[in-house]
Image (cartoon, rainbow, N blue to C red):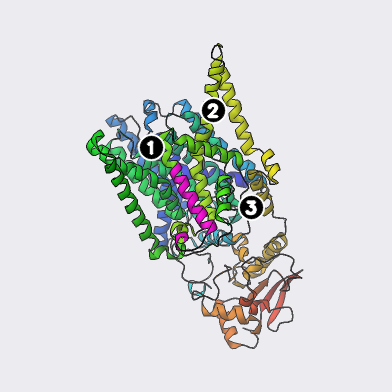
């Protein structure tokens, strides 16, 4: 089945890149920047078409979503080639100004080699840290969020409705019979890509999920970081080259998102973010034509929309990263108006006004009803402020092991940014995000909600944001150390003929030592601290949580039982208690269970018949209201994957289990009137509901 995984990834690369590249080359974008930005254009076009089909009730598949987009972009590309040949347009646009001398040769070998290194490092890191830890290509992380993610992918495939409105994992159940109502907008770029792979390649949903994650980590993320780090470092090509390795050095992103939550939509959105930031930064470069600025503005807006559809909080992560840059640009307005004659206080006033405007926009968004459910979500504090500060310094964010060497490089990069003044604002952005992280990790109250509410006050998402900001600082830090080594060697061995070779060898050796120290599965510092190296810890966690044979909420025996159940029930609705693992039975294996989610029962969004069944199903033989409720759902079966007695259960329940909510379902056993055993294995049962 790993061949199927490879095939799904290859198809995904073609589908994510080809339409976007064709369209961006049609508007004369630099080829490498076009490759970096292409997944944003492709996924946005697919999402828009899926939304339109949903509005006019057209069943979506890869055939009528991907192929029309591909056909249109091919036509546009061919037409643009004809027009350019006729009018003589040769040069390409939006090359970072330090690379402007390469305008006539945008695929000059150095840039191509560096870009290839980014992709190769992405593939290598993903294979070593993630793929090699999978027990099977369709192994899944059986954690809370994946109930929704896998269920939505299957719902997309089964219903053909790929809209980002009214998103829920309720395929196969009529809308008025869905246990939980009130579903609205939800970011679905990740789910849509998974559905495309299932539709096009015919792979299982779980395998498509892993393939989608590989696509975003191994390909989309490094392609985007190539463009962002190129514009940040400009002539400092050494720092840009180091980015191909250091982009994957932080445990908090992208790796932690694969083993906690899981936060797959956030993984996709953060992977897509770098090229969008690139488009904003390039707006402020000097000597740009109006066409280039207009083009960059349009692409920035389109990219921001794509981020909203991938995971909305990515826009706020991007905003915090850019806020210091915007303030810096605002402070330069008097220089543009008056030149060197402007007073310092003029610049300070403009900077202050920009801070006021940004703060007002932030507060207005915080009060927006659309975001109320997000910003009001509370994650409790789990450590003190002092410990949170220490952990940030060691890059030991929530749930990740310390990364002392990498943290040292970030600190060096912070100091170096005040010498290499172009990146001072990146340091300010990093400090801002770390402050937000510390506030959310160590406090409660309105300040926590205002600062971190756009990320659900979730320190995992904030830690990932901080890690993204730290990547250029780590690159700058290591580059600074290499420069110091070079100067030292040149001063000591200045009289030797081969001093340049000695200097290069010394720099390469030091760089290799640091890279090994960051990525090595054996670490002296980690051994002294009594912990595993951070990336090794991620890999071992992948092996543990993606182990299909290990005891789990929805283990191998239960999957086998569900597959036998499918032979009996077919597409019929099956009642269940979701916390026993059956919540995953729909997303992973397609069993049409009634209860798809494990939370929010007992709230106003739950339909009445769902409440009656939860609380009184064991009385179906005597209670007419229960009989009527079951009949309304159309359910004829009840599946139980574990006996109710916790000492008899052969697999654990999800942490969301509340026995007071499920007395009616839990109360059913082999002796309960109205239920006939259809299938029985160990502590697993499939009952036919007789008295309806």
Residue that carries the numbered disc 1 in the rendered image: 25
Q: Which residue is mark 3?
A: 138
Label 1, label 2: how far apart the Cα atoms are: 37 Å
Nearer the camera: disc 2 or disc 3? 2
Q: Which mark is drawn over residue 58?
A: none
* Depth check, front residue: 584 or 645: 645
Instruction: Kindly indicate the quadrant of the structure image that contains residue 513.
Output: top right
- Could you tell me if residue 563 is visible in this image? yes
The magenta stretch spans residue 308 = no
Say whether residue 439 is magenta.
yes
- Give the number of marks: 3
> In this rendering, is residue 575 above or below 317?
below
Report the front residue among 123 and 523. Answer: 523
For the record, the magenta segment spans: 427-448
- The CA distance from mark 1 to mark 3 is 36 Å
The answer, for residue 68, to whether it is visible in the render is no
Q: Are marks 1 and 2 in contact (CB under 8 Å)?
A: no
- SS category of the residue bearing label 2: helix
The label on residue 482 is 2
């Amino acid at each position: 089945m790993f061949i199927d995984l490879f095939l799904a990834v290859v198809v995904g690369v073609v589908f994510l890149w080809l339409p976007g590249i064709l369209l961006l080359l049609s508007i004369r974008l630099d080829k490498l920047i076009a490759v970096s930005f292409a997944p944003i254009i492709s996924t946005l076009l697919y999402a828009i078409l899926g939304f339109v089909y949903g509005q006019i009730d057209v069943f979506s598949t890869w055939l009528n979503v991907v192929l029309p987009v591909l056909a249109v972009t091919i036509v546009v590309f061919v037409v643009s080639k004809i027009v350019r040949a006729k009018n003589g347009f040769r040069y390409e646009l939006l090359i970072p100004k330090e690379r402007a001398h390469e305008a006539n040769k945008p695929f000059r070998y150095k840039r191509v080699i560096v870009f290839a290194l980014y992709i190769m490092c992405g593939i290598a890191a993903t294979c070593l840290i993630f793929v090699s830890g999978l027990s099977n290509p369709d192994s899944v992380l059986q954690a809370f969020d994946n109930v929704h993610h896998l269920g939505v992918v299957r719902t997309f495939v089964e219903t053909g409705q790929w809209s980002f409105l009214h998103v829920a994992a309720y395929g196969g159940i009529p809308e008025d019979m869905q246990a939980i109502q009130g579903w609205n907008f939800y970011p679905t770029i990740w789910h849509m890509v998974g559905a495309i792979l299932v539709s096009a390649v015919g792979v299982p949903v779980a395998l498509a999920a892993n393939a989608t994650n590989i696509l975003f980590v191994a390909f989309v993320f490094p392609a985007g970081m190539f463009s962002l780090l190129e514009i940040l470092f400009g002539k400092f090509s050494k720092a840009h080259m180091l980015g191909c390795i250091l982009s994957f050095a932080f445990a908090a992103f992208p790796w932690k998102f694969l083993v906690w939550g899981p936060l797959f939509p956030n993984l996709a959105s953060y992977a897509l973010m770098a090229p969008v930031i690139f488009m904003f930064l390039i707006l402020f470069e000097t000597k740009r034509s109006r066409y280039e600025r207009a083009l960059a503005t349009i692409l920035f807006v389109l990219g921001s929309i794509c981020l909203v559809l991938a995971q909305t909080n990515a826009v706020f992560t991007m905003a915090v990263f850019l806020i210091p840059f915007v303030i810096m640009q605002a402070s330069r307005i008097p220089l543009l108006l008056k030149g060197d004659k402007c007073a310092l206080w003029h610049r300070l006033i403009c900077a202050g006004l920009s801070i006021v405007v940004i703060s007002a926009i932030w507060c207005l968004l915080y009060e927006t009803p659309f975001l109320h459910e997000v910003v009001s979500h509370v994650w409790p504090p789990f450590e003190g402020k002092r410990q949170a500060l220490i952990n940030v310094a060691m890059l030991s964010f929530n749930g990740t092991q310390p990364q002392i060497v990498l943290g040292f490089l970030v600190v060096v990069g912070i100091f170096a940014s005040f010498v290499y003044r172009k990146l001072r604002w990146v340091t300010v952005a990093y400090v801002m995000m770390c402050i937000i992280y510390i506030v959310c990790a160590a406090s409660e109250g309105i300040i926590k909600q205002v600062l971190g509410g756009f990320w659900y006050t979730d320190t995992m998402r904030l830690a990932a944001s901080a890690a993204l900001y730290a990547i250029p600082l780590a690159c700058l830090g290591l580059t600074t150390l290499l420069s110091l080594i070079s100067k030292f060697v040149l001063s000591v061995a200045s009289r030797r003929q081969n001093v340049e070779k000695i200097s290069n060898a010394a720099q390469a050796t030091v760089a290799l030592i640091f890279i090994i120290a960051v990525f090595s599965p054996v670490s002296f510092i980690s051994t002294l601290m009594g912990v595993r190296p951070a990336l090794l810890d991620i890999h071992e966690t992948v092996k543990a949580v993606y182990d299909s044979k290990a005891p789990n909420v929805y283990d191998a025996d239960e999957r086998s039982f569900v597959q036998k159940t499918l032979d009996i029930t077919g597409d019929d609705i099956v009642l269940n208690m979701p916390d026993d693992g059956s919540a995953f039975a729909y997303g992973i294996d397609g069993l049409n269970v009634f209860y798809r989610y494990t939370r929010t029962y007992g709230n106003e969004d739950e339909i009445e018949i769902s409440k009656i069944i939860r609380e009184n199903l064991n009385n179906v033989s005597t209670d007419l209201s229960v009989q009527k409720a079951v009949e309304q759902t159309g359910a004829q079966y009840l599946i139980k994957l574990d006996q109710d007695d916790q000492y008899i259960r052969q697999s654990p329940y999800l942490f969301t289990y509340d026995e007071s909510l499920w007395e009616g379902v839990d109360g059913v056993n082999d002796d309960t009137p109205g239920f006939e055993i259809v299938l029985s294995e160990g502590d697993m049962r499939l009952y036919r509901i007789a008295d309806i």
